[in-house]
Image (tube, rainbow, N blue to C red):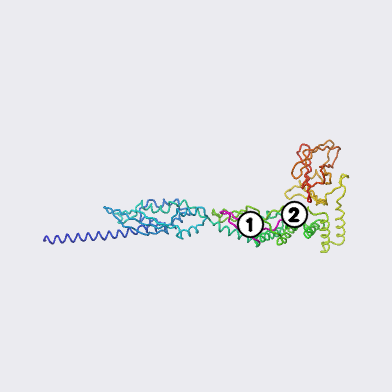
Amino acid sequence: MSLKKVISIVLAASLIGITGCKDRHEEDIKEIEKIPEQFIEALAEDDQDAVEDVSLIRNYYYSTMMYRNTFRFDFLKHAISLASIDEIGEITFNDEYDTARAEVTISYPDLAEFSLENGADYLTLDQMYELLDSGIYETEKTMDLKFQYKEKDGKWYLSPGSSKRVYELFTSSLWFIDDPVAAAPSEGEEMFEDMFDSIAHGDLYDIPMGLNLEECRVYDDVSIRGEGDKTREAVENFVSAYVNYILEHDHEFTNTYSYNYRLEGSAPSSEDLYEALTTDEFLVDYYMNFIRYSSLNWDLDDMWDDQSALIYDTLTEAIPHCSPEDYVFSASAYSLRYGNTDDTFPFIADTDLIIEPEFGMFVAEHSVTQDQYLRCMEEAIERLLQEGEIDDLMYEAMIEDLYSDNDTQSTGSDGTLPNQAVNVVEHVPSWCDDGSIVYGYSDPDENGIWMSYSKQPGWLDTVEYYVDEDGIWITCIFDHRFNAGTTLLVDWWIDDEQVVDSERIYIAEDNTTVVTVSLPTDGFPDNDMYEMRLWEDGHHHVICYTTLYNTVY
């Protein structure tokens, strides 16, 4: 073979080698250019095999364990899915041709900025995704990434360090992002408004707040009251009408702070509602029910059910005609924030739904003057006659009893002082199961004074009083008999201020059952309340506890 031919063969082989190297170089560049985007896509899909197919990241799965059981892992994947490769600079190789480097520009959501701007907000997960998707937190960063070639695999990978740096673009601020809420404060405000709308339309139970009707019964503040279906329905109607009044007048719902909500507006005037319980029309119906029980054999529970229902039916009818008074109701619903969406009653009331009035049925019943009492009671008896519930003989007997029982100047039990107590009635309070405590009270007398007292059966029988310009006399009539030489103690308070402490009273005769105590005054008593407590010696046992209320001065 000639030298010329040999040289030609060597040159041809060299040219083939050079062409082969050039082709591999171009293929490697194309392969490396795809790796950053493939790596990001694999992370976004949490595809461990795909992640390890393009990178040498160490312990990928275990590095994500801290996030996997929290919302942050899905949030992380969503953020990564929004990233993209904007530009890949020139790829350079080392001399051994087993590593390469390139400047890579990545666009991605800046989670650090996201956490700073939304740290004080309460966002649902959907709202967080919407903010990310809006692109307002998009930023970019150019990174010097390193790639490594594995001879045994015959392919290029993103190096461990570069893989970690890309991944930390998203994870470094992940723990600073607040947890999402189950419902945003704005959603809570909408629920708050809908709740009042439901109440106003009569739906008191399928609402996101526990509504205790007993707590809404602020006007029948008496010891015994109805508990039946009529009462329940009447109270429900009252509450609905009360809230409807608020919504029909100027009002404002506000989300005062995070999950705290407020309704401000106007409620029906408590004074106007109270006045509805003092009218002749109401009292006639009220007295008719008492007569039905006392003379027509009505069941006691049914009578009280009718009385309580009458109170709230009367208030409901009065509501549209009431003047307004300021109203504020507030509630909180933090269970919405912390994910307790199954909580039946997320709203917790901070104030009363119904404004508690200064006066209710107790004062209304005892503010009736003697003239009004006689007038309304007589009309109640006449109505019963007209409606055929009583006959003429019963009517005449009731009228006769009405006027004979209401002589306000009858002589007291001790035969010396007139008894000014009008229509004294007694009852056992509902909380007393054994009858060991009895409450008594009277109607207002012609001076506007009425009395209440408590007693223990077997000790005290009843109480009488007399008041004039010189003072107050309270006569305690006992079932218990006192022996001569017994010492009793009496204390007096005027408007909650004690004015007499441990005044001694000595029993002069055996078998004494009437004890009269007095409080001198300078002119006719004009304070609101006079309270007397009579004790056995030693202040260890109250045997008479009586209070006089002044409704005129």
Name the dominant secondary structure of the magenta segment: strand
Residue 220 pos. (x, y %): 73, 54
Give left or right: position of 207 versus 166.
Answer: right
Q: Secondary structure at mark 1?
A: strand
Q: Which of the 4 image quarters holds residue 540?
A: top right
Most foreground residue, 441 or 263: 263
Gap in angstroms between the C-alphas marked 2 and 1: 27 Å
Q: Amino acid at mark 2?
A: Met
Residue 307 pos. (x, y %): 75, 57
Give left or right: position of 35 versus 399.
Answer: left
Residue 484 pos. (x, y %): 85, 36
Quarter of the image with the N terminus in it = bottom left
Q: Which mark is residue 264?
A: 1
- Dot 2: few (<14), some (14–19), or many (≥20) neighbours within 10 Å? some
Of label 2 and label 1, which has the lower sequence position? 1
Q: Is residue 462 visible?
A: no
Give left or right: position of 39 versus 176.
Answer: left
Q: Is residue 151 magenta?
A: no
Q: Is residue 184 visible?
A: yes
Name the residue beneath numbered marker 2: 361
Residue 7 pos. (x, y %): 14, 60
Q: Which mark is residue 552?
A: none
Instruction: Specify start and end residues of the magenta stretch as a single range.
Output: 249-270
